Every structure is written in C-alpha cells, then in structure tokens.
Amino acid sequence: MDYVRMARPARPNLSAGGLTSYGFAIEAAIGRRPMRYLVGRRFVGPSAVTGLFVLLPQILAGSHVWITENSDRGECEVETHIPTMKNSVRPVERYLFDCLPLTDIGYLDLMAWRYPGLGATPEDVEVDMSWSRWSAAEPRCYLGPVTTPGLTVTEAVDRETGMVVARAVDRLREPFRRWEVVEMGRPDVGGLPERVRASRTRTGGWTDFRRVGEPVPVPREAFDAGPARLREALEHGLSGKAA
C-alpha cells in the first residue's frame, strides 16, 4: 500500500509504437464460448478514434463500440450498437465504468486516455493494488464523477514505459472490476499488450484476452467513413489473423 500523487502518464493506452492508424485482433473465451474482436485506433494530435467490432460470440456478432476522444479538450464520447437496435446509443455515464454486454471488456480499458469525468488529480488516499502483478508500478486513485457516488478508479503506471498496466474500479470501497496487462508486446509495437486479463466481482474468475498477430496499418480515411467502413478495412488488413 502507498500514498501517491503523480502526473498523468505521457503515453496513451493501447498505442502501437510509430503506428498512428492501425488495427489488431483479439481472442478470448468465457467457459467454452469463444470470443473474437477486431480493434481499430487512429490518433490525430490530441484526438483519438477507437472502434471495437464483435465477431464472436454469434449472439453479439455485428455489435460495435465507437469511442471518440480529445485529450486537450477533455472530451470523450462513447456509442454502442447491437444488431437488435435500430440506432446506436450512448451509454449513460455510470455505465462507462462497467463492461460491454455479455463480456468482460470494460469501456475504460478501450479509451486512449483517462476518462475525463474522473477527478482532475489523484487523491491522497491509501491504495491497495496487491491483487496485481505490477507491484513496482506507480498507483494513483481518482474519484468518480458525481453520477457515480462512492466510485473510484485506481490505475498503476509502469515506471519504465509510462503505460497504464493495471486498473481497479471500486464502489463504496468494494472491488467491482479488475484489469491488468499480463504480457507486454515487443518494443517495436510500443509494447501493445500481447495478453491482458479482466475480472468482475459479480461474475468471479478472470477472462484472458490475447492479441492475435501484430497490429497492421489501417487507412486513416476508413475512420472518417464510420464503423461499417472501418470494419471492412480491419477485416481486409487482418484477414487470416482473427480466424
């Protein structure tokens, strides 16, 4: 345990070295149910666009999450779409600290930067990250927004890379979600994690998420054309890597 106050890490989450418009594939399983996703990310200065597309399980195939951020302006917008919906929806703020439907993928874990609705500076509070393998990382705790009374988000930042390598969401001091990097990627892809794991208290156990292959460049204009075009570009660039 420690008392800490530190600056925001210089590096955005899930960055891929010199690539500024790229995609990668992820596989996981809950029990015997396989899960497969495609992720696209584009950076333009202080702005980021992230799209996650569900290939499996079949019940969620065609679902996607679309996140737009601007770190300078403190903006973050999230939209989700499930095939049974007529239109995409924007989750209310309190749901952004939870997971996508029927998965252990947290919205916070997909964002390029810390969610701007959290406190502006870390709190001087006691932090317990003993559950994580990143004991040498610098922990910091942020209060949740007014829409989530009693919620805190604690992140551990790797001293060497400046990356967030573990994250804990607590409600009224009780564990709610846990996420951490299990295996870092190679330096030439910016350490983009090879493997992460996540857990929700109410479901128990951990879900492992593994990156399939290396990140690939994606045309920048695919992000401007919207989710459908980006998914096509990801499927083309990652053909054979998410199968």
Image (cartoon, rainbow, N blue to C red):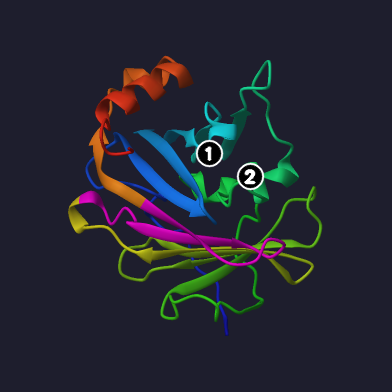
Q: Extreme front residue here?
A: 32
Residue 26: x, y in percent? 39, 45
**Residue 215 lies in the magenta stretch:** no
Pointer 2 local density, CA inside 10 Å: few below 14, some 14–19, many at least 20: few
Residue drawn at 46 percent across, 73 percent down:
138
Image marks 1 and 2: residues in contact by CB distance under 8 Å: yes
Residue drawn at 47 percent across, 47 percent down:
34
Query: Who is closer to the viewer here, 89 or 242?
Result: 242
Query: Who is closer to the viewer here, 79 or 82?
Result: 82
Residue 56: x, y in percent? 49, 37
Q: Quick check: can you spot residue 202?
A: yes
- Which three-letter amino acid code belongs to the residue tagged 1? Pro
The residue carrying mark 2 is: 102
Between the residue at mark 1 and the residue at mark 2, the CA separation in whole angstroms equals 9 Å
Q: Quadrant of residue 181?
A: bottom left
Q: Quadrant of residue 160?
A: bottom left
- Give, as a single range, the part of the protein colored magenta: 189-210
Q: Quick check: can you spot residue 115?
A: no
Residue 6: x, y in percent? 50, 68
| Quadrant of the image containing the N terminus | bottom right
Is 220 rendered above or below residue 119? above
Q: Looking at the rendered structure, which numbered label has been put on residue 57?
A: 1
